[in-house]
Amino acid sequence: MDMPELPEVIHFKHYIESTALNQTIADIEVLNDQILANDSEQQFKKHLSGHAFASCSNYGKYLFLHSTGAHYLVMHFGMTGSPVYFKNEGHKPDYPRAVFHFDNGYKLAFNCMRMFGRLELTEAKEAFIEDKELGPDISSEGFSFETFRKLMENRRGMIKSSLMDQHLMAGIGNEQSDEILFQSRIHPKRKVSDLSEDDLQKIYRTMRSVIETRVECLDQGRPMPDNFLLEHREENEACPACGGTIEKIAAAGRSGYFCPSCQD
């Protein structure tokens, strides 16, 4: 199971924007305080109760909910986290770890089956990003090809590992790095130093299109296109491009998937 990556976080951003903004928080239930990264339950409630979430933004694998008070609520989704907006108890999710009760009767739950997700408060988004030592967010307007090319300069490792390095650039994880390299037709263990300018251009363009396509599919509740690897990320599955056999590979401490016939 792979943790939510940038596309899922952007999807959660769109979800919260369409449901839970500009509603006063009347009460907060913390059903498991292990979900709180850096605050006591009392402090957590004190800083958010009586305020509303005015807007939200994403950075890498983090979602920032900007409150009308002095703090941001930061959501990190771990393996199984997601926001769920509901009113009736019959629609309450199965694993709510914290529930924000709004004064209009609706609720926003942080649902997280495996308890790897975290909720955290910060007064300064930029300071939080700096403290986590995150690289530039790949979805930001300023993330140009020139930015990407410079980040790749003097890299000695594999391209898959570099794409997944959150200190280098934020947002891509195991699943999306597999898809980007599959669509680029580049082997995950290719050394960055061996990639040409054309290769880097191809990866950059594909990165943009893969993230955009994934977000669109999540927002619209439809499956990924047939030519994408995502639905075939399993050893011995048939490659959606050539019909060959998908193989498993170890990279950056994770199991990746690729087609040896398509990717060189």
Image (spheres, grey):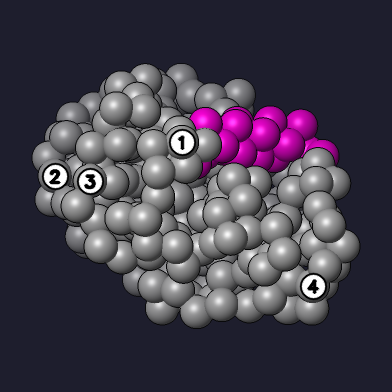
The residue at the point 67 percent across, 34 percent down is 213
Residue 81 % position (x, y): 53, 58
Q: Which mark is residue 162?
A: none
The stretch of residues the image draws in magenta is 203-222
Mark before the other along the chain sequence, 2 or 4: 2
Secondary structure found at label 3: loop
* Residue labelled with disc 1: 198
Q: Which residue does the image show at 72% across and 64% down from the upper left? A: 261
Tell me the residue at 53%/25% (across/down). Answer: 17
Which residue is more in the foreground, 184 or 197?
Answer: 197
Mark 1 or 2, closer to the camera? 1
Say what secondary structure mark 2 lies in: helix
Magenta-drawn stretch, dominant element (helix, strand or loop):
helix
Give the vertical position of 24 relative to 195 (above or below): above
Cβ atoms at labels 4 and 1 below 8 Å apart:
no
Question: What residue is shown with label 3?
Answer: 153
Q: Earlier in the sequence, mark 3 or mark 4?
A: 3
Q: Quadrant of the N terminus?
A: bottom right
3D distance between C-alphas at marks 4 and 1: 27 Å
Q: Amino acid at mark 4?
A: Thr
Callout 3 touching callout 2 (CB < 8 Å): no
SS category of the residue bearing label 1:
helix
The answer to whether marks 2 and 4 mark residues whose Cβ atoms lie closer than 8 Å is no
The residue type indicated by label 2 comes to Glu
Circle 4 residue = 245
Mark toward the viewer: 4 or 1:
1
Residue 45 visible in the picture: no
Q: Mark 2 sits on what residue?
A: 130
